[in-house]
Image: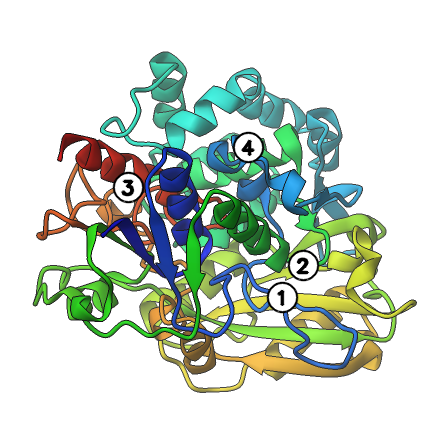
Amino acid sequence: MLDAVVVGAGPNGLTAAVELARRGFSVAVFEARDTIGGGARTEELTLPGFRHDPCSAAHPLGINSPAFRALPLDRYGLEWLHAEFPMAHPFPDGRAAVLSRSVGETAASLGPRDAGAYRRLVEPFLPHWDTLARDFMSLPTTALPRDPVTLARFGLVGLPPSTWLTRRFRDEPAKTLFAGLVAHVMAPLTGLATGAIGLVFALAAHARGWPVARGGSQSISDALAAYLKDLGGTIHTDYEVKRLDDLPPARAYVFDTSPTALARIAGFGRYYEGYRYGPGVFKIDYALDGPVPWTAEEPRRAGTVQIGGDSAEIGTALREASRLGRAPGRPFLITVQPGVADPTRAPEGKQVFWTYGHVPSRWTGDLTDAVERQLERFAPGFRDRVLARATAGPPEIAARNANYVGGDIASGAVSGLQTLLRPTLSLFPYRTPHPAVYICSSATPPGPGVHGMSGHNAAKAVWRRLRQT
């Protein structure tokens, strides 16, 4: 009998398996797809030689993850590559703000009236970042806070809506840049703890940047898998699990799946029926005949570029997709240009380009024209650089990854109490009604992103039980 079986070979499932195997437990992973990776894959989606990331591409939470940083993933081929700027946000007038590794450079790009306010916002937390990140991405039930005072101060700043936090800024560049940071998790700007979301992304950039993985996001999954195999774990692909009886006998079962799928497989009935999924995304991967022709200079040197004319435009786009049930006419876009840091991703002189906009859950329309009109506002001539494109709306995204129900790449709405307490209102979110079954996907704290911390936290709960039995 195995000690643990993990269902799903995404970053959280692989991390959970590694954490258990490191502690001497026998572990096997079962993945429904024919390749591992979940939200961290790399494929040739457009033309030969153009390597695209179907889901996550830039990894501010990955390089800052306490779980990943404790593992020897560099020995298994993971290398983080950095652009000059982690992120840039161009404006319609040709200027741009930047999120730089330097707090001073970032503050200066926001204008003289907001430079001091930005410094006062981030500088008190930056010296404590590693401890804060560990505390923020764990739960008291899995690890007691190492610095409860700083965590409490962070909560006072971050728990209110981001619109409260941005009142300290006087001009639009700072408000817009911060609104874009919040929108990375598809949360309405007025939601609970959205200030904390924006602040985490800013601090992550100043601490270690927003890198890409050399060769693509698949490198993260491959490094975890290689380490797991060296620890004695096994991985079985092309193995769909429809019920618990499909799995070999084990002392514990850990699911890197959506709550909906877990309830169906384990027979939990309506246990997770209150769990809410958020809006979907419409994603386009481009093969380009050269760099994106940004009007502003700074985006040409940035790994990630946010696209939204101002904070009101970003707020409207989020509200239309998440609450009004319609696709935005001017979508807020998150774009990544991996080739700025990693030229191996495309043939010489060419580029891969990654972007998505928010749309309603299960939306079946085509957002391509609206996306490209937005890009042309800030990069005139963009369409002339397009060699090929691969589009994916909510149905296609859900078909690629069953955890993304309705096209929701956050694996659950990041709003209301569900921002902090997911998938159920419990201090023990990794447990389920079955004492031997656990959940470790992005539907559990700390939520979406390629960071492995949901798997790490769930593994702690599992190994505590295994040691008691």
- Mark 3 or 1, which is nearer the eye? 1
Task: Look at 74% across and 30% down and name the residue there.
Answer: 108
Secondary structure category for the residue under label 3: loop
Task: Look at 81% across and 68% down and name the residue there.
Answer: 346
- Mark 2 or 3, which is nearer the eye? 2
Residue 147: x and y, percent? 39, 14
- Mark 3 or 4, which is nearer the eye? 4
Classify 10 Å Cα crowding around label 2: few (below 14), some (14-19), many (20 and above). many
Which image quadrant for residue 239? bottom left
Residue 435: x and y, percent? 10, 47
Judging by the rendered image, the residue that carries numbered circle 3 is 420
Q: Is residue 82 above or below residue 138?
A: below
Q: CA distance from mark 3 to mark 1?
A: 30 Å
**Between disc 3 and disc 4, whose residue precedes?**
4
Q: CA distance from mark 1 to mark 2?
A: 6 Å
Residue type pointed to by label 3 = Leu
**Between disc 4 and disc 1, whose residue precedes?**
1
Question: Answer yes or no: do the residues labelled 3 and 4 have beta carbons within 8 Å?
Answer: no
**Between disc 2 and disc 3, whose residue precedes?**
2
Classify 10 Å Cα crowding around label 3: few (below 14), some (14-19), many (20 and above). some
Residue 437 visible in image:
yes
Q: Is residue 374 above or below residue 311?
A: below
Marker disc for residue 42: 1
On screen, residue 40 versus residue 150, left or right, reads right
